[in-house]
Image (cartoon, helix red, strand yellow):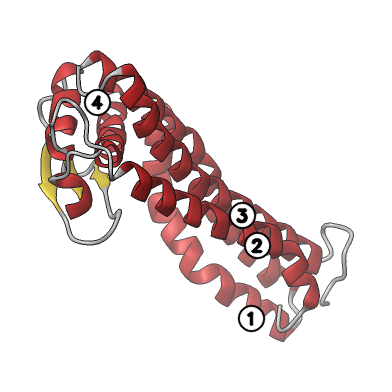
Amino acid sequence: MFFDPMYFIFIIPGLVMAMWASWKTKSTFKKYSEYAASSRVTGAEAARMLLDNAGVHDVSIEQVGGFLSDHYDPMHKVLRLSPDVYGSHSLSAIGVACHEAGHAMQHADGYVWLNMRSAMVPMVNIGSNFSYIVMMIGMFLHNPLFIYAGIGLFSIAVLFSIVTLPVEWDASARAKKLMVRAGIVGDREAAGAGAVLNAAFLTYLAAAVSSVMTLLYYLWRAGLLGGRSDD
C-alpha cells in the first residue's frame, strides 16, 4: 500500500463520488434552507409530529452541536438534531429531522436491517481499529495469515457500509411518505425536502463504493483477485 500507484487506481472512483456527493448534499441543503414550510413548524416540531403520528411516543428530541450532526441514538431513544435543523422552519431542516425520525420508527418496528447494523457496531469498531495494523504486520513479516486476517477484519466494515444503504433509504422513504400525511408539508414542499434526503443518501452510497474498492485493492494486493502477492 505504500505509494502503490494501483491503490489510487482502485480508490479514485470512490473519492470522486464522495467529493461529488458531499458537494451535492451541502448545496442542496443550502438551496432548500431558503424555503420555509407553509406549516411553519421547526425541524424539532416536525420530528415530534411524525413520531406522534406513527405512534412512537417514547423518543425524546434534543439539540446537539455541529453541522448536519443529526442522528438517532437507539440505545437511549434520543433523536439529536443540529442547530441548523432543530429550530429552523426550512424544508431542508424538516427533511433531515423527519429522516432521523424515520430511524426511530425503524427501531420501534424492529426493522431487520437497522437491527443488523446496530449488532455490527462492536465488530466494526474492532475491525476499523485493527485491520490496517494486522495487514501491515503481515506485509512486514510476509505472513499471509496476518494479511488475510486483516482483510477479514476490514471486510466487516465494508459489510457495515453496505447494510447501511437499505437503512438510510428506508428512513428517507418513511419520511417522504409520512411528512405529507402528518400535514408537515404539502406535496410540492415534500419534493424539496425529499431532494435533500436524496442528496444525503449519495454520501452513504459513496462511502460504500469507497470501502468496496479499497477491499478489492487489498484482495488484489494479497493475490486473491488475480493480482500480485506480497509473499
Task: Compute the Cα span from label 2 to label 3.
Answer: 23 Å
Whether pointer 2 and pointer 4 mark residues with C-beta atoms closer than 8 Å, the reply is no
The earlier-in-sequence mark between 4 and 3 is: 3
Label 4 neighbour load within 10 Å: few <14, some 14-19, many 20+:
some
- Residue at image location 29% in from the left, 45% down from the top: 33
Query: Which quadrant is the N terminus positioned in?
Result: bottom right
| Mark 4 residue type | Ala
Counting from the top left corner in percent of width and height, residue 17 is at 61, 54
Q: Is residue 156 visible?
A: no
Residue of label 1 = 137
Disc assigned to residue 151: 2
- Residue at image location 87% in from the left, 64% down from the top: 227
Give the structural element (helix, strand or loop) at label 3: helix
Counting from the top left corner in percent of width and height, residue 26 is at 41, 53
Q: Is residue 99 visible?
A: yes
The relative height of residue 108 versus residue 222 in the rendered view (above or below) is: above
Taking the image as shown, residue 36 lies to the left or right of residue 224, namely: left
| Mark 3 residue type | Met
Taking the image as shown, residue 130 lies to the left or right of residue 217, namely: left
Task: Compute the Cα span from label 2 to label 4.
Answer: 35 Å
Task: Compute the Cα span from label 2 to label 1.
Answer: 12 Å
* Quadrant position of residue 147: bottom right
Label 1 neighbour load within 10 Å: few <14, some 14-19, many 20+:
some
Counting from the top left corner in percent of width and height, residue 62 is at 11, 47
- Residue at image location 13% in from the left, 32% down from the top: 41
The relative height of residue 75 versus residue 156 in the rendered view (above or below) is: above
Task: Compute the Cα span from label 1 to label 3.
Answer: 31 Å
The earlier-in-sequence mark between 1 and 3 is: 3
